[in-house]
Image (spheres, grey):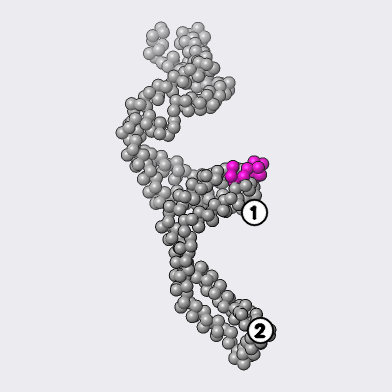
Amino acid sequence: MTGDKTDPANKLLELHVKHELAALKGAKLRTFLKQEVGELLDLAGDVTLNRIASEQQVMATIQRVVVNMELDAGIPELAGEMANEVLNAPVQATTTLGDVIARDQAAGFVEELLELRGQREQMISNIMAHPVYQELISNVVYQGVINYLYEDNLITKSVPGVGSMMKFGKRMANKAMPGLDETFERRFKSWLSDSLPGLIGRSEQFLQRALCDDEVRDTVMAAWLATEDRTLAELREGLGDAELQTFVVLGYEFWLRFRKTACFDGCAQAAVAHLFVKYGDRPLSDLLGDLGVTREVIMAEVNAWAIPVIDVLREEGYVEALLRRRLAAFYNSAPARKILA
């Protein structure tokens, strides 16, 4: 526009800008935002989710924002720094585990876990079948038998000198037949290997019977009672800043990989599909209500964030510049000037 202050278009522009600036502060701004929030919520009672979005749109947004967006390397660094600050905050030394999770809540978690009886039995079976556990049992039985033969059996304890004599005999036999120890160990472990499935099976049956609901409940709650009065700082002893940084980096790398997997895509599609099945043909107000987004909640955030931010933008001159950019083109347009002429 021209800089002529006597130009009617310029005069109207200045008046319009001043009017809008006066309306975008204080009580007028709050009244305006409250009215618009009310209008939008009333409109949400008539507009359905399917009218403003589709499953494909939401999935495309997830693909762009969650899956494909390249995250800067500073994100894991910042996350690690913030995690360090949280773990080293003074409140960690004064807050107990019981302050965070009440005893009745812990008991509720235990009761729900006890309902997963099939998963518990399967977990025990998987542990028993694991090669590492079988190797552990084999070594424990072998060492127990050897210790019993040479040190802990009733004869060596009751008759003085028998234990020493047995060990002496063992040394002499090894001198006469080198490799006797290795041969005995190999044959004994071979026999133990053949007998191990039966031992494992019987121990599994024992554990399945021993770890009944009452036993698990008593054991877990006893552990809880022993730790609920300990502070969070005490419970995290041994977890230093370096270890925490490592966990943050590992978690970040896991997320970068997992978000591109078929599993994540399938889970996202299932969640979005369910959302539209449940709310697609219903008013948006139903979805907002189920999410707890009410008029009062929105206005509380408007008062806390929108109004202070707009105040800062107005003080910095951004709001006025925005109004001029939006209105100047209209007042300088041929139709407007034709009417003013």
Q: Earlier in the sequence, mark 2 or mark 1?
A: 2
Count neighbours of disc 1 (C-alpha within 10 A) and say few if under 14, some if 14 to 19, many if 20 or more. few
Image location (x, y in percent) of residue 281: 31, 33
Establish if 101 lies above or below 192: above
Does the magenta portion include 292? no
Q: Which of 226 and 170 is in front in this view?
A: 226
User: Furthest residue to the front?
Assistant: 158
Query: In this image, 216 relative to 177: left or right?
Result: left
Q: Which mark is residue 159?
A: 2
Q: Give the range drawn in magenta.
A: 88-99
Q: Residue at x 61, y 80 (%)?
A: 154
* The C terminus - image quarter: top left
Q: Nearer the viewer, mark 2 or mark 1?
A: 2
Type of amino acid under label 1: Gly
Q: Which residue is drawn at 58% across and 75% down?
A: 144
- Which image quarter: residue 277? top left
Q: Which of 145 and 85 is in front in this view?
A: 145
Type of amino acid under label 2: Val
Image location (x, y in percent) of residue 151: 63, 79
- Which image quarter: residue 170? bottom right
Q: Nearer the viewer, residue 168 or 81?
A: 168
Query: In this image, 256 relative to 234: left or right?
Result: left
Q: Residue at x 54, y 52 (%)?
A: 221
Q: Name the residue under label 1.
A: 238
Count neighbours of disc 2 (C-alpha within 10 A) and say few if under 14, some if 14 to 19, many if 20 or more. few
Q: Nearer the viewer, residue 231 or 86?
A: 231
Residue 38 visible in the snapshot? yes
